[in-house]
């Protein structure tokens, strides 16, 4: 059985799965509810609650895959609440391929899941350090919205500095990307602006060093250097 409840003041759709979930449940309840919500809000955030003992028929599994393909770009964020099992394990496994952030919560964490759906997941802070140096700090886990909000400010900074700049990229509080769409937006932003970077200093912990050292100079196309947690040394180098 599937029940759907649309939050009246947001784009959050709560979806509860219990008992035996069939293809008919998808056809008559879930798909129409998602279609209506996306038509109203363009994109939606889904809270999926899986009750203990929930079982899927083969027909339901097929409908689930078809629905995911049909609404691939319609989901902005998905939270799943349920006990550890094949459904939650499959969700974790496929989360990285989803075009939106996905997170799994324990059965007693429904309120935490609702907060996660409403809160900001990550942020990008830009600071003009003078002399054509831009400090970009990535915080938390980023989704596509974070890049959308900052692109205009980045372009304005570049125009004000004659079309080129030096980059101080701060990864000390960066936790990665929420879903593959966030990663795509990151590389799209890099691709669109890499020819404008004169020089880049990257600050982060040792976990980032191997990745950055392999791709920074190639991707950015300019002199790049990694600094292990030493912000002051990176700042002195980028300004020199």
Image (cartoon, rainbow, N blue to C red):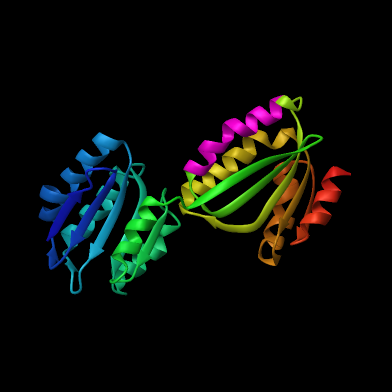
Q: Which is the main secondary structure of the residues drawn in magenta?
A: helix
Q: Give the residue displayed 50% in from the left and 47% down from the top.
A: 182
Locate residue 230, reporting x and y percent: 78, 60
Can you give x and y, in whole percent of width and height, for residue 72 in the image? 34, 45
Image quadrant in which the C terminus is located: top right
Q: Which residues are magenta?
A: 145-159
Q: How many marks?
A: 0
Q: Residue at x 74, y 62 (%)?
A: 229
Q: Residue at 12% x, 66% y: name it.
A: 20
Asked whether residue 201 is drawn in magenta, I would say no
Q: Is residue 158 above or below residue 87?
A: above
Residue 147 within the segment the image draws in magenta: yes
Residue 226 falls left or right of residue 175? right
x and y percentages locating residue 135 in the rendered image: 71, 44
- Residue 10 in the image: x percent, y percent? 29, 43
Residue situated in front as seen by the camera: 129 or 49: 129
Quadrant of the rendered image containing residue 206 = bottom right
Q: Choose top left, top right, bottom left or bottom right for residue 226.
A: bottom right
Say which residue appears at 16% left-offset and 58% top-offset: 59
Give the left or right position of residue 127, taking residue 79 as reference: right
Q: Nearer the viewer, residue 207 or 232?
A: 232
Which of the pair 217/102 is nearer the observer?
A: 102
Q: Quadrant of the N terminus?
A: bottom left
Quick check: 143 above or below 61? above
Which of 240 and 87 lies nearest the eye of the viewer? 240
Image side of residue 109 versus residue 99, left or right: left
């Amino acid at each position: 059985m599937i029940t759907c409840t649309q939050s009246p003041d947001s784009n959050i759709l709560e979806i509860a799965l219990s008992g035996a979930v069939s293809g008919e449940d998808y056809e008559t309840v879930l798909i129409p509810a998602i279609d209506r919500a996306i038509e109203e809000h363009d994109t939606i955030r889904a809270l999926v609650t899986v009750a203990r003992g929930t079982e899927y028929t083969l027909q339901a599994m097929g409908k689930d895959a078809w629905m995911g393909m049909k609404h691939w770009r319609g989901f902005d964020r998905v939270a799943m609440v349920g006990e550890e099992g094949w459904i939650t394990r499959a969700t974790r496994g496929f989360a990285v391929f989803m075009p939106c952030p996905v997170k799994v919560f324990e059965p007693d964490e429904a309120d935490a899941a609702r907060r996660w759906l409403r809160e900001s997941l990550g942020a990008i802070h830009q600071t003009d350090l003078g002399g054509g140096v831009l400090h970009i700090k990535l915080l938390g886990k980023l989704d596509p919205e974070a890049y959308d909000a900052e692109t205009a400010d980045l372009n304005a900074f570049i125009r004000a500095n004659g079309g080129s700049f030096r980059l101080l990229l701060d990864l000390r509080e960066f936790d990665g990307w929420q879903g593959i769409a966030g990663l795509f937006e990151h590389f799209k932003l890099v691709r669109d602006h890499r020819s404008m970077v004169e020089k880049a200093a990257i600050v982060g912990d040792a976990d980032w060093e191997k990745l950055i050292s392999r791709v920074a100079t190639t991707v950015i196309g300019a002199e790049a250097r990694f600094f292990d947690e030493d912000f002051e040394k990176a700042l002195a180098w980028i300004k020199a």
